[in-house]
Image: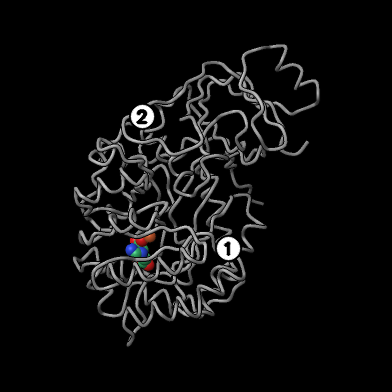
Amino acid sequence: MNGSLVIENIDEIVTPTGNCGVSGNAMQTLKQFAHHSVIVEDGKIVAITKDASEINAYKSKGYPTLSGEGKTMTPGYVDSHTHLIFGGYRPEEFDMRLKGVAYMEIMKKGGGIANTVKMTQAATLEHLIAAGAARLSKMLSMGTTTVEAKSGYGLTLETEIKQLKALKALKRISPVSLVSTFLGAHAVPENQNASDFVAYLNDSVLPVVKQEALAEFVDIFCEDHVFGIEDSKVHLKAAKSLGFKLKMHADEIVPLGGAELAAEMGAVSADHLLHISDKGIQSLAKGGVVATLLPATAFTLREQYAPARKLIDSGCIVALATDFNPGSCFTYSIPLIIALATLQMKMTIEEVITALTLNAAAALNRADTIGSVEVGKQADLLLHDFPSYKFIPYHVGINTVAHTIKNGIVYTNNNISRAVFC
Ligand code: NIG
Ligand code: FE
Protein backbone atom coordinates (compact mmCIF):
# COMPACT_ATOMS: atom_id res chain seq x y z
CA MET A 1 0.00 0.00 0.00
CA ASN A 2 3.05 2.20 -0.33
CA GLY A 3 1.99 5.27 -2.26
CA SER A 4 -1.73 4.94 -1.46
CA LEU A 5 -3.61 7.37 0.79
CA VAL A 6 -6.68 9.52 1.32
CA ILE A 7 -6.09 13.27 1.70
CA GLU A 8 -9.34 14.25 3.31
CA ASN A 9 -11.41 17.41 3.19
CA ILE A 10 -8.88 19.83 1.71
CA ASP A 11 -10.08 23.43 2.12
CA GLU A 12 -8.99 24.39 -1.39
CA ILE A 13 -7.41 22.58 -4.33
CA VAL A 14 -6.04 24.78 -7.13
CA THR A 15 -4.52 23.47 -10.32
CA PRO A 16 -3.97 24.14 -13.99
CA THR A 17 -5.45 21.38 -16.16
CA GLY A 18 -4.54 19.35 -19.18
CA ASN A 19 -1.70 17.33 -20.65
CA CYS A 20 0.30 20.08 -22.32
CA GLY A 21 1.69 23.55 -21.61
CA VAL A 22 -0.82 26.39 -21.22
CA SER A 23 -0.19 29.59 -23.20
CA GLY A 24 -0.98 33.27 -22.83
CA ASN A 25 -4.14 34.36 -21.02
CA ALA A 26 -5.14 30.76 -20.29
CA MET A 27 -2.27 30.63 -17.74
CA GLN A 28 -4.55 32.70 -15.52
CA THR A 29 -7.22 29.97 -15.29
CA LEU A 30 -6.92 27.51 -12.42
CA LYS A 31 -9.48 24.87 -11.59
CA GLN A 32 -10.63 25.08 -7.97
CA PHE A 33 -12.27 22.56 -5.67
CA ALA A 34 -13.59 23.40 -2.19
CA HIS A 35 -13.62 20.76 0.58
CA HIS A 36 -12.80 17.82 -1.67
CA SER A 37 -10.69 14.78 -0.86
CA VAL A 38 -7.96 13.37 -3.09
CA ILE A 39 -7.51 9.60 -3.30
CA VAL A 40 -4.11 8.24 -4.27
CA GLU A 41 -3.46 4.61 -5.27
CA ASP A 42 0.00 3.27 -6.04
CA GLY A 43 1.38 6.77 -6.49
CA LYS A 44 -1.37 7.98 -8.85
CA ILE A 45 -4.42 10.20 -8.34
CA VAL A 46 -7.54 8.04 -8.75
CA ALA A 47 -10.27 10.36 -7.47
CA ILE A 48 -11.01 13.96 -6.45
CA THR A 49 -14.28 13.72 -4.64
CA LYS A 50 -16.72 15.02 -2.04
CA ASP A 51 -18.69 11.78 -1.99
CA ALA A 52 -18.51 10.39 1.57
CA SER A 53 -19.31 6.81 0.54
CA GLU A 54 -16.52 6.82 -2.08
CA ILE A 55 -14.06 8.25 0.47
CA ASN A 56 -15.10 5.65 3.06
CA ALA A 57 -14.70 2.83 0.55
CA TYR A 58 -11.02 3.74 0.13
CA LYS A 59 -10.56 4.27 3.86
CA SER A 60 -11.96 0.82 4.52
CA LYS A 61 -9.23 -0.62 2.28
CA GLY A 62 -6.93 0.53 5.06
CA TYR A 63 -5.40 3.48 3.22
CA PRO A 64 -3.84 5.99 5.61
CA THR A 65 -5.61 9.34 5.94
CA LEU A 66 -4.04 12.78 5.94
CA SER A 67 -6.19 15.71 6.98
CA GLY A 68 -6.49 18.57 4.50
CA GLU A 69 -8.39 20.79 6.91
CA GLY A 70 -7.19 24.38 6.85
CA LYS A 71 -4.89 23.55 3.95
CA THR A 72 -4.49 24.33 0.24
CA MET A 73 -3.38 21.76 -2.29
CA THR A 74 -1.37 22.58 -5.43
CA PRO A 75 0.59 20.31 -7.77
CA GLY A 76 4.22 19.72 -6.75
CA TYR A 77 6.66 22.30 -8.12
CA VAL A 78 8.78 21.33 -11.10
CA ASP A 79 12.18 23.04 -11.17
CA SER A 80 12.89 22.70 -14.89
CA HIS A 81 16.30 24.44 -15.05
CA THR A 82 19.10 23.76 -12.56
CA HIS A 83 22.84 23.10 -12.53
CA LEU A 84 22.52 20.81 -9.49
CA ILE A 85 25.81 18.92 -9.72
CA PHE A 86 29.13 20.72 -9.24
CA GLY A 87 32.28 20.70 -7.13
CA GLY A 88 33.29 23.58 -4.84
CA TYR A 89 31.82 27.05 -4.33
CA ARG A 90 32.46 30.61 -5.58
CA PRO A 91 31.62 32.98 -2.70
CA GLU A 92 34.58 35.23 -3.57
CA GLU A 93 33.04 35.93 -6.99
CA PHE A 94 29.74 36.82 -5.34
CA ASP A 95 31.65 39.28 -3.18
CA MET A 96 33.37 40.76 -6.28
CA ARG A 97 29.95 41.23 -7.89
CA LEU A 98 28.66 42.95 -4.75
CA LYS A 99 31.55 45.36 -5.25
CA GLY A 100 30.48 46.06 -8.85
CA VAL A 101 32.44 43.63 -11.06
CA ALA A 102 30.20 42.24 -13.86
CA TYR A 103 29.52 38.50 -14.25
CA MET A 104 30.97 38.40 -17.79
CA GLU A 105 34.07 40.35 -16.64
CA ILE A 106 34.81 37.66 -14.06
CA MET A 107 34.31 35.01 -16.77
CA LYS A 108 36.65 36.78 -19.22
CA LYS A 109 39.36 36.86 -16.52
CA GLY A 110 39.24 33.06 -16.22
CA GLY A 111 36.82 32.89 -13.28
CA GLY A 112 33.17 32.00 -13.48
CA ILE A 113 32.22 28.68 -15.04
CA ALA A 114 35.93 27.79 -15.60
CA ASN A 115 36.49 28.04 -11.85
CA THR A 116 33.77 25.48 -11.10
CA VAL A 117 35.04 23.29 -13.94
CA LYS A 118 38.39 22.92 -12.13
CA MET A 119 36.68 22.07 -8.84
CA THR A 120 34.28 19.62 -10.51
CA GLN A 121 37.13 17.88 -12.29
CA ALA A 122 38.83 17.45 -8.90
CA ALA A 123 35.69 16.18 -7.11
CA THR A 124 34.99 12.47 -6.65
CA LEU A 125 31.79 10.89 -7.96
CA GLU A 126 30.83 10.07 -4.35
CA HIS A 127 31.19 13.71 -3.33
CA LEU A 128 29.02 14.89 -6.24
CA ILE A 129 26.32 12.36 -5.31
CA ALA A 130 26.33 13.30 -1.61
CA ALA A 131 26.20 17.05 -2.32
CA GLY A 132 23.38 16.53 -4.84
CA ALA A 133 21.37 14.39 -2.39
CA ALA A 134 21.63 17.02 0.36
CA ARG A 135 20.43 19.77 -2.00
CA LEU A 136 17.54 17.63 -3.29
CA SER A 137 16.21 16.94 0.19
CA LYS A 138 16.12 20.69 0.92
CA MET A 139 14.37 21.28 -2.42
CA LEU A 140 11.76 18.66 -1.53
CA SER A 141 11.00 20.49 1.72
CA MET A 142 10.18 23.63 -0.32
CA GLY A 143 7.80 21.69 -2.55
CA THR A 144 10.00 20.70 -5.49
CA THR A 145 9.05 17.20 -6.66
CA THR A 146 10.85 17.10 -10.06
CA VAL A 147 14.21 18.67 -10.92
CA GLU A 148 15.98 19.05 -14.24
CA ALA A 149 19.75 19.01 -13.81
CA LYS A 150 22.51 19.78 -16.28
CA SER A 151 26.10 18.71 -16.72
CA GLY A 152 28.41 21.44 -18.03
CA TYR A 153 31.08 21.77 -15.37
CA GLY A 154 33.30 19.11 -16.94
CA LEU A 155 33.96 20.23 -20.52
CA THR A 156 35.85 16.95 -20.99
CA LEU A 157 34.37 13.55 -21.74
CA GLU A 158 35.47 12.18 -18.38
CA THR A 159 34.05 14.91 -16.15
CA GLU A 160 30.85 15.46 -18.12
CA ILE A 161 30.17 11.72 -17.79
CA LYS A 162 31.02 11.89 -14.06
CA GLN A 163 28.37 14.59 -13.54
CA LEU A 164 25.78 12.64 -15.51
CA LYS A 165 26.63 9.45 -13.59
CA ALA A 166 26.09 11.34 -10.32
CA LEU A 167 22.61 12.22 -11.61
CA LYS A 168 21.97 8.61 -12.58
CA ALA A 169 22.86 7.50 -9.04
CA LEU A 170 20.64 10.21 -7.54
CA LYS A 171 17.69 8.96 -9.62
CA ARG A 172 17.94 5.74 -7.63
CA ILE A 173 18.35 7.25 -4.17
CA SER A 174 16.44 10.55 -4.11
CA PRO A 175 12.65 10.76 -3.80
CA VAL A 176 12.76 13.76 -6.16
CA SER A 177 12.40 12.82 -9.86
CA LEU A 178 15.36 13.93 -11.96
CA VAL A 179 15.65 14.78 -15.64
CA SER A 180 19.19 14.84 -17.05
CA THR A 181 20.48 17.36 -19.57
CA PHE A 182 23.87 17.35 -21.29
CA LEU A 183 25.30 20.89 -21.29
CA GLY A 184 28.83 20.18 -22.54
CA ALA A 185 28.59 23.45 -24.50
CA HIS A 186 28.49 25.58 -21.34
CA ALA A 187 31.83 27.39 -21.81
CA VAL A 188 34.72 27.28 -24.26
CA PRO A 189 37.79 25.74 -22.55
CA GLU A 190 40.91 27.91 -22.31
CA ASN A 191 43.02 28.08 -25.51
CA GLN A 192 40.29 26.53 -27.69
CA ASN A 193 37.85 28.10 -30.09
CA ALA A 194 34.11 27.55 -29.97
CA SER A 195 33.81 25.79 -33.36
CA ASP A 196 36.59 23.28 -32.61
CA PHE A 197 35.12 22.58 -29.19
CA VAL A 198 31.65 22.00 -30.69
CA ALA A 199 33.24 19.56 -33.18
CA TYR A 200 34.88 17.72 -30.24
CA LEU A 201 31.56 17.52 -28.39
CA ASN A 202 29.71 16.32 -31.47
CA ASP A 203 32.28 13.69 -32.44
CA SER A 204 33.58 12.44 -29.11
CA VAL A 205 31.14 13.21 -26.31
CA LEU A 206 27.53 13.27 -27.57
CA PRO A 207 27.68 9.72 -29.00
CA VAL A 208 28.90 8.36 -25.63
CA VAL A 209 26.20 10.22 -23.70
CA LYS A 210 23.65 8.74 -26.10
CA GLN A 211 25.02 5.23 -26.01
CA GLU A 212 25.11 5.15 -22.21
CA ALA A 213 21.63 6.79 -22.06
CA LEU A 214 22.93 9.44 -19.65
CA ALA A 215 20.81 12.40 -20.79
CA GLU A 216 17.44 13.12 -22.32
CA PHE A 217 18.04 16.77 -23.30
CA VAL A 218 20.95 18.72 -24.79
CA ASP A 219 21.36 22.40 -23.87
CA ILE A 220 23.86 25.10 -24.96
CA PHE A 221 24.92 28.50 -23.57
CA CYS A 222 24.20 30.48 -26.75
CA GLU A 223 25.69 33.90 -26.00
CA ASP A 224 28.08 36.52 -27.33
CA HIS A 225 31.68 35.48 -26.42
CA VAL A 226 30.50 31.92 -25.65
CA PHE A 227 28.69 29.92 -28.39
CA GLY A 228 27.32 32.09 -31.21
CA ILE A 229 24.30 31.30 -33.38
CA GLU A 230 26.21 29.30 -36.01
CA ASP A 231 28.10 27.11 -33.52
CA SER A 232 24.90 26.59 -31.55
CA LYS A 233 23.09 25.47 -34.68
CA VAL A 234 25.79 22.93 -35.53
CA HIS A 235 25.70 21.47 -32.01
CA LEU A 236 21.91 21.38 -31.71
CA LYS A 237 21.58 19.73 -35.14
CA ALA A 238 24.03 17.00 -34.13
CA ALA A 239 22.14 16.47 -30.86
CA LYS A 240 18.78 16.34 -32.62
CA SER A 241 20.00 13.81 -35.16
CA LEU A 242 21.02 11.52 -32.27
CA GLY A 243 17.49 11.79 -30.84
CA PHE A 244 18.09 14.23 -27.96
CA LYS A 245 15.43 16.80 -27.11
CA LEU A 246 16.70 20.38 -27.08
CA LYS A 247 16.94 23.28 -24.65
CA MET A 248 18.85 26.56 -24.93
CA HIS A 249 20.29 29.25 -22.66
CA ALA A 250 19.13 32.05 -24.95
CA ASP A 251 19.29 35.86 -25.12
CA GLU A 252 20.47 36.15 -21.51
CA ILE A 253 23.03 38.91 -21.84
CA VAL A 254 22.51 40.28 -25.36
CA PRO A 255 19.68 39.78 -27.90
CA LEU A 256 21.60 37.35 -30.11
CA GLY A 257 18.62 35.61 -31.72
CA GLY A 258 18.74 32.54 -29.48
CA ALA A 259 14.96 32.42 -29.12
CA GLU A 260 14.53 32.44 -32.90
CA LEU A 261 17.04 29.59 -33.19
CA ALA A 262 15.23 27.61 -30.46
CA ALA A 263 12.02 27.82 -32.50
CA GLU A 264 13.81 26.96 -35.74
CA MET A 265 15.38 23.87 -34.14
CA GLY A 266 12.14 22.73 -32.50
CA ALA A 267 13.59 23.07 -28.98
CA VAL A 268 11.31 22.15 -26.09
CA SER A 269 12.31 25.29 -24.17
CA ALA A 270 14.33 28.50 -24.45
CA ASP A 271 15.58 29.72 -21.09
CA HIS A 272 16.64 33.06 -19.47
CA LEU A 273 15.43 35.47 -22.25
CA LEU A 274 16.25 38.69 -20.37
CA HIS A 275 17.02 40.39 -23.67
CA ILE A 276 14.66 38.57 -26.04
CA SER A 277 13.60 40.65 -29.07
CA ASP A 278 10.00 41.12 -30.23
CA LYS A 279 10.77 38.81 -33.14
CA GLY A 280 12.07 36.21 -30.66
CA ILE A 281 8.84 36.45 -28.65
CA GLN A 282 6.77 35.85 -31.80
CA SER A 283 8.94 32.85 -32.73
CA LEU A 284 8.47 31.20 -29.32
CA ALA A 285 4.71 31.81 -29.36
CA LYS A 286 4.35 30.45 -32.89
CA GLY A 287 6.64 27.47 -32.31
CA GLY A 288 5.07 26.46 -28.97
CA VAL A 289 8.54 26.61 -27.37
CA VAL A 290 8.28 26.96 -23.57
CA ALA A 291 9.80 30.27 -22.41
CA THR A 292 11.50 29.40 -19.12
CA LEU A 293 12.15 32.48 -17.00
CA LEU A 294 14.74 32.47 -14.22
CA PRO A 295 14.10 35.58 -12.11
CA ALA A 296 16.54 34.68 -9.33
CA THR A 297 19.44 34.93 -11.80
CA ALA A 298 18.41 38.43 -12.90
CA PHE A 299 17.98 39.32 -9.21
CA THR A 300 21.39 38.04 -8.14
CA LEU A 301 23.18 39.57 -11.14
CA ARG A 302 21.21 42.80 -10.64
CA GLU A 303 20.04 42.67 -14.26
CA GLN A 304 16.67 43.52 -15.76
CA TYR A 305 14.02 40.78 -15.54
CA ALA A 306 12.79 38.86 -18.59
CA PRO A 307 9.66 40.49 -20.08
CA ALA A 308 7.20 38.06 -18.50
CA ARG A 309 4.10 40.19 -19.17
CA LYS A 310 4.99 40.69 -22.81
CA LEU A 311 5.67 36.97 -23.27
CA ILE A 312 2.35 35.96 -21.69
CA ASP A 313 0.37 38.69 -23.42
CA SER A 314 1.90 37.57 -26.75
CA GLY A 315 0.62 34.03 -26.25
CA CYS A 316 3.77 32.22 -25.06
CA ILE A 317 3.85 29.19 -22.75
CA VAL A 318 5.80 30.61 -19.79
CA ALA A 319 7.52 28.48 -17.13
CA LEU A 320 9.53 29.58 -14.08
CA ALA A 321 12.60 27.83 -12.62
CA THR A 322 15.44 28.58 -10.20
CA ASP A 323 18.59 28.16 -12.39
CA PHE A 324 20.32 26.97 -9.20
CA ASN A 325 24.08 27.02 -9.92
CA PRO A 326 27.32 27.82 -8.08
CA GLY A 327 27.93 31.13 -9.88
CA SER A 328 25.20 33.40 -11.16
CA CYS A 329 22.41 32.09 -8.92
CA PHE A 330 22.98 30.12 -5.74
CA THR A 331 19.37 29.45 -4.81
CA TYR A 332 16.87 26.62 -5.17
CA SER A 333 14.21 28.50 -3.23
CA ILE A 334 10.82 28.34 -4.92
CA PRO A 335 9.41 30.83 -2.36
CA LEU A 336 11.97 33.36 -3.65
CA ILE A 337 10.96 32.67 -7.27
CA ILE A 338 7.30 33.25 -6.36
CA ALA A 339 8.16 36.57 -4.70
CA LEU A 340 10.22 37.81 -7.66
CA ALA A 341 7.73 36.65 -10.30
CA THR A 342 4.76 38.31 -8.60
CA LEU A 343 6.36 41.47 -7.21
CA GLN A 344 9.01 42.19 -9.86
CA MET A 345 7.80 40.55 -13.07
CA LYS A 346 4.15 41.42 -12.49
CA MET A 347 2.85 37.90 -12.97
CA THR A 348 -0.36 36.99 -11.15
CA ILE A 349 -0.22 34.16 -8.61
CA GLU A 350 -2.46 32.07 -10.89
CA GLU A 351 0.08 32.49 -13.73
CA VAL A 352 2.94 31.73 -11.34
CA ILE A 353 1.32 28.48 -10.16
CA THR A 354 0.80 27.41 -13.80
CA ALA A 355 4.40 28.39 -14.63
CA LEU A 356 5.87 26.37 -11.75
CA THR A 357 3.76 23.25 -12.33
CA LEU A 358 2.13 22.30 -15.66
CA ASN A 359 4.20 24.62 -17.86
CA ALA A 360 7.42 23.57 -16.14
CA ALA A 361 6.39 19.95 -16.72
CA ALA A 362 5.88 20.88 -20.40
CA ALA A 363 9.43 22.29 -20.43
CA LEU A 364 10.54 18.74 -19.56
CA ASN A 365 8.14 17.02 -21.96
CA ARG A 366 6.25 15.55 -19.01
CA ALA A 367 2.96 17.48 -18.94
CA ASP A 368 1.06 14.27 -19.63
CA THR A 369 2.16 12.68 -16.34
CA ILE A 370 2.89 15.51 -13.85
CA GLY A 371 2.11 19.20 -13.25
CA SER A 372 -1.57 19.14 -12.27
CA VAL A 373 -3.97 17.69 -9.71
CA GLU A 374 -6.02 15.49 -12.02
CA VAL A 375 -7.15 11.88 -12.07
CA GLY A 376 -4.52 9.75 -13.82
CA LYS A 377 -1.58 12.01 -13.01
CA GLN A 378 1.27 11.08 -10.68
CA ALA A 379 0.50 12.02 -7.07
CA ASP A 380 3.12 14.78 -6.77
CA LEU A 381 1.18 17.15 -4.54
CA LEU A 382 1.71 19.91 -2.00
CA LEU A 383 -0.35 20.69 1.06
CA HIS A 384 0.23 24.31 2.03
CA ASP A 385 -0.32 25.42 5.61
CA PHE A 386 -3.17 27.87 4.88
CA PRO A 387 -6.79 27.64 3.62
CA SER A 388 -6.38 29.52 0.30
CA TYR A 389 -3.73 29.83 -2.41
CA LYS A 390 -3.78 33.62 -1.90
CA PHE A 391 -1.62 32.94 1.17
CA ILE A 392 1.21 31.61 -1.00
CA PRO A 393 2.56 34.91 -2.48
CA TYR A 394 1.52 36.79 0.66
CA HIS A 395 4.21 34.79 2.48
CA VAL A 396 7.07 36.68 0.83
CA GLY A 397 10.04 34.34 0.55
CA ILE A 398 8.56 32.04 3.20
CA ASN A 399 7.95 28.34 2.64
CA THR A 400 4.23 27.56 2.97
CA VAL A 401 4.55 23.82 2.27
CA ALA A 402 3.51 21.64 5.23
CA HIS A 403 3.56 18.29 3.39
CA THR A 404 5.27 17.41 0.14
CA ILE A 405 3.65 14.31 -1.35
CA LYS A 406 5.82 12.55 -3.91
CA ASN A 407 4.39 9.57 -5.78
CA GLY A 408 1.89 9.26 -2.95
CA ILE A 409 4.56 9.19 -0.21
CA VAL A 410 4.17 11.97 2.39
CA TYR A 411 7.17 14.04 3.49
CA THR A 412 6.26 16.32 6.38
CA ASN A 413 8.10 19.62 6.79
CA ASN A 414 8.36 22.07 9.66
CA ASN A 415 9.26 19.27 12.03
CA ILE A 416 11.78 21.32 13.93
CA SER A 417 12.03 20.15 17.52
CA ARG A 418 13.90 21.75 20.35
CA ALA A 419 17.35 20.39 21.03
CA VAL A 420 17.69 18.39 24.21
CA PHE A 421 20.92 19.01 26.12
CA CYS A 422 22.26 16.50 28.56
O1 NIG B 1 22.42 29.57 -16.35
N1 NIG B 1 24.43 31.19 -18.17
C1 NIG B 1 25.16 30.23 -18.05
N2 NIG B 1 25.16 29.31 -17.10
C2 NIG B 1 24.67 29.45 -15.78
C3 NIG B 1 25.71 30.07 -14.88
C4 NIG B 1 26.76 29.13 -14.55
C5 NIG B 1 27.80 29.61 -13.57
O2 NIG B 1 28.02 30.81 -13.37
O3 NIG B 1 28.41 28.70 -12.99
C6 NIG B 1 23.34 30.15 -15.81
O4 NIG B 1 23.16 31.26 -15.28
FE1 FE C 1 21.37 27.95 -16.43
Amino acid type at circle 2 is: Ala
Question: Which mark sits nearer the N-terminus, 1 or 2?
Answer: 2
Please say if 417 is above or below 198.
above
Residue count near mark 2 (Cα–Cα under 10 Å), binned few <14, some 14–19, many ≥20: some
Point out residue 32 in the picture as x, y percentages from the top left corner: 47, 21
Q: Which residue does the numbered mark 1 point to in the structure image? A: 167
Q: Nearer the viewer, residue 265 or 329?
A: 265
Residue 48 screen position, x and y as percent: 61, 22
Residue 26: numbered disc: 2
Q: Position of residue 67 (x, y in %)?
A: 63, 24
In-front residue for pair 125/233: 233
* Ligand 1 quarter of the rendering: bottom left
**Closer to the camera, 354 or 305?**
354
Q: Residue at x 65, y 38 (%)?
A: 410
* Amino acid type, mark 1: Leu
Circle 2 SS class: helix
Front residue of this view, candidates 389 and 311:
311
Vertical placement of 42 versus 331: above or below? above
Is the shortest distance between ligand 2 and the CB of mark 2 under 8 Å? no
Quadrant of the snapshot with the N terminus: top right
Residue at 46% of width from left, 23% of height from top? 31
Left or right, 376 with reference to 276: right
Q: CA distance from mark 1 to mark 2?
A: 34 Å
